[in-house]
Image (cartoon, coloured by chain):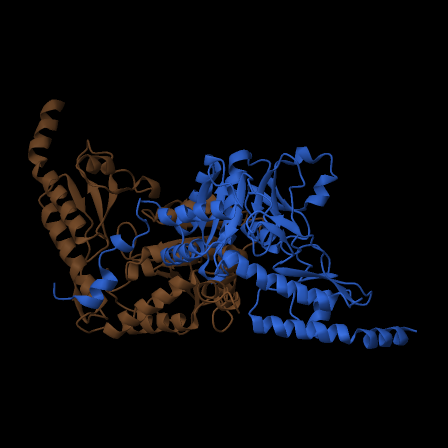
Chain colours: A blue, B brown
């Protein structure tokens, strides 16, 4: 063959770079095996009776699972109601609204429906539960009984949370983004008990994107191998991450505890079956409340102090709350801490001024 | 810091592996630049007045663009009708049916509507046009006037098609899968004239998957650099691919031309502005018609001869037609050719039998 080398590398028949992996599916069998190994080793999810569905980030799975659950259990005449407990991760609502399907619709917060005794006449519920929660990092359980539940365990790893026991819900979500920080790789997975739901979720992924990137699957496989080989060793990613996040939370709290203007969520310590000890809090986010009456838009107030946060408005927590991310480079975190310190130090003077100008 | 090396590599702050690329968006600016360079060098698309939207395969863009076009131009009370000309790529219909949105619905083939004089009362159309077409490889134009049109140019590269001029439709699709064969990388892009449509398509990608894989973007960038540096040289991917595909088509036709049982689509030669000569046909697919009355299911008949094809039923071409892929390894193509040869050689005997058993 005369056209050799470079062209041949790029063009060497479609088959070897095709949609399908070894085994004929869209998912790397080897990666699936390593994900199961990791969950078993960490003890954060029961995997033996679960089907595994890969996606382009756990984000793609939000609608995939709503689709899978609403199609299985629901008649078209009565669309399923997709709900979450406030404050919730706004992307659940954004997807339900954008896809705007006949079979389901965003139906607000669980609080609205928990009080509503006539709710059985409105069709099935699909409840998003995030545990630990985004944005406020609390451990969550479903609020509405008898619903289909999608439990997003993105943050249920030992660097962010203690691990009391393996999670064992029917439908669970995880993501590489919050395991090792590789958000840009776009890799998430679902653990699903029911074969029919798993099959429908996989069919959704196939129809919407014909699976996810092969390069990403190979990269995540490599990462998992490194992570697995270092568990409980000197370079354990979870011990490392826990120490980083605990230290950040400790330093941030030391400053905020001097403030009457802003406060942070309280997180109880808990026994971690992975680290085999009681763990201090090490959350991914600070859920900031503005306590002063005049700071009705907390996010805007912080922005005025040079602190970028995500507003709580979208997830119906009200504008008194906002989310500050602790997932940053060390340099960025130092800048954040500096600005929070300046804000708190300026409190007495500022509040004195506000009070005197109000009188 | 005591936990160094491996953990640090994996966990070194979320920022550097985050969703955003250099510049703050979800798309590699450098990759965008190289895609534009490639289109200019090949002359297959006018890019200067277009916005570029990346996705997880062009597959993700089908619904992204239907969403973008239906939301911009259409009232909810009158859902947009998504249509294509038969035979069409079945994935357009599969997505429209699966997403089942309030704002649009699959409305069948253009033939139904072209005859219907009252069609203006049914709302707007969004017409998928694939050119060269999948499955039958013909050059296509929109059939319905005044509609929104999505032109899928997946196969509009010089290895599969002559390039009479740069395509310049308002909304165009391309994919790495059919450029270099990297289907498993899942990378596609849209060229969009209208800023508002592009913004809505990008918002869809952001909401459904927060962009696509970073690893894939880096890989495709590397591939484009190799392709670009070899254009018109000894290792030109298009000259290489054209020679491979032309040879396969020539060999397949030589066998099928001896058959009364099966026939292939006719493709006229055409002048290619990239290769600067009249090109022989070099299509990605053979669109097989079964000519004998008893072979009413063409795909099944071929399967009986050990030849795997994609049935034409799904895309409303009728079961007399089926698609045979010429995108295979050389070994696989040789096996295909062998089995077609056996089928054709057995014709006289077989047809003789069929005729005599019918009398």
The residue at the point 50 percent across, 37 percent down is A193
Occupied quadrant, residue A288: bottom right
Where does residue B233 sit, x and y in percent of width and height? 19, 74
Q: Is residue A210 left or right of residue A65?
A: left
| A198 or B266: nearer the viewer | A198
Residue at the right extreme of this rendering: A359
Where does residue B216 sit, x and y in percent of width and height? 38, 62
The residue at the point 23 percent across, 37 percent down is B298
Does residue A138 sit above or below A252 in this rendering? above
Figure disc tally: 0
Occupied quadrant, residue B183: bottom left
The residue at the point 64 percent across, 72 percent down is A336
Q: Can I make out residue B280 in this image?
A: no
Does residue B95 sit above or below B35 in this rendering? above
The C terminus of chain B lies in quadrant: top left
Where does residue A240 sit, x and y in percent of width and height? 53, 61
Q: Is residue B75 left or right of residue A300?
A: left
Where does residue B143 sit, x and y in percent of width and height? 37, 54
Q: Can I make out residue B196 in this image?
A: yes
| B1 or B106: nearer the viewer | B1
Q: Is residue A196 left or right of residue A265?
A: left
Occupied quadrant, residue A169: top right
């Amino acid at each position: 063959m005369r056209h050799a080398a470079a062209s041949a590398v790029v063009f060497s028949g479609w088959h070897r770079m095709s949609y399908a992996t070894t085994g004929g599916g869209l998912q790397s069998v080897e990666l699936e095996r390593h994900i199961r190994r990791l969950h078993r080793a960490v003890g954060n999810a029961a995997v033996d009776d679960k089907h595994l569905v890969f996606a382009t980030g756990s984000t793609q799975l939000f609608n995939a699972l709503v689709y899978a659950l609403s199609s299985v259990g629901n008649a078209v005449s009565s669309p399923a109601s997709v709900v979450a407990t406030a404050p919730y991760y706004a992307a659940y609502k954004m997807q339900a609204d954008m896809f705007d399907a006949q079979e389901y619709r965003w139906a607000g917060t669980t609080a609205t429906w928990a009080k509503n005794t006539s709710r059985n006449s409105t069709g099935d519920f699909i409840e998003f539960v995030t545990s630990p929660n985004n944005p406020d990092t609390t451990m969550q359980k479903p609020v509405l009984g008898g619903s289909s539940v999608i439990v997003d365990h993105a943050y249920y790893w030992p660097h962010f949370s203690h691990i009391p026991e393996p999670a064992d819900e029917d439908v669970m979500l995880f993501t590489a983004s919050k395991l090792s920080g590789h958000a840009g790789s776009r890799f998430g997975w679902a653990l699903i008990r029911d074969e029919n739901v798993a099959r429908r979720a996989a069919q959704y992924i196939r129809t919407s994107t014909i699976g996810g990137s092969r390069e990403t699957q190979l990269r995540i496989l490599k990462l998992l191998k490194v992570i697995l080989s270092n568990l409980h060793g000197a370079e354990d990613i979870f011990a490392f991450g826990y120490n980083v996040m605990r230290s950040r939370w400790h330093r941030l709290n030391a400053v905020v505890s001097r403030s009457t203007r802003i406060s942070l969520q309280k997180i109880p310590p808990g026994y971690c079956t992975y680290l085999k000890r009681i763990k201090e809090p090490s959350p991914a986010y600070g859920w900031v409340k503005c306590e002063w009456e005049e700071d009705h838009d907390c996010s805007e107030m912080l922005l005025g102090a040079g602190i970028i946060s995500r507003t709580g408005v979208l997830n119906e927590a009200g504008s008194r709350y906002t989310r500050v991310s602790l997932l940053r480079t060390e340099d960025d975190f130092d800048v954040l801490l500096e600005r929070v310190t300046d804000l708190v130090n300026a409190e007495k003077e500022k509040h004195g001024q506000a009070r005197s100008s109000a009188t």
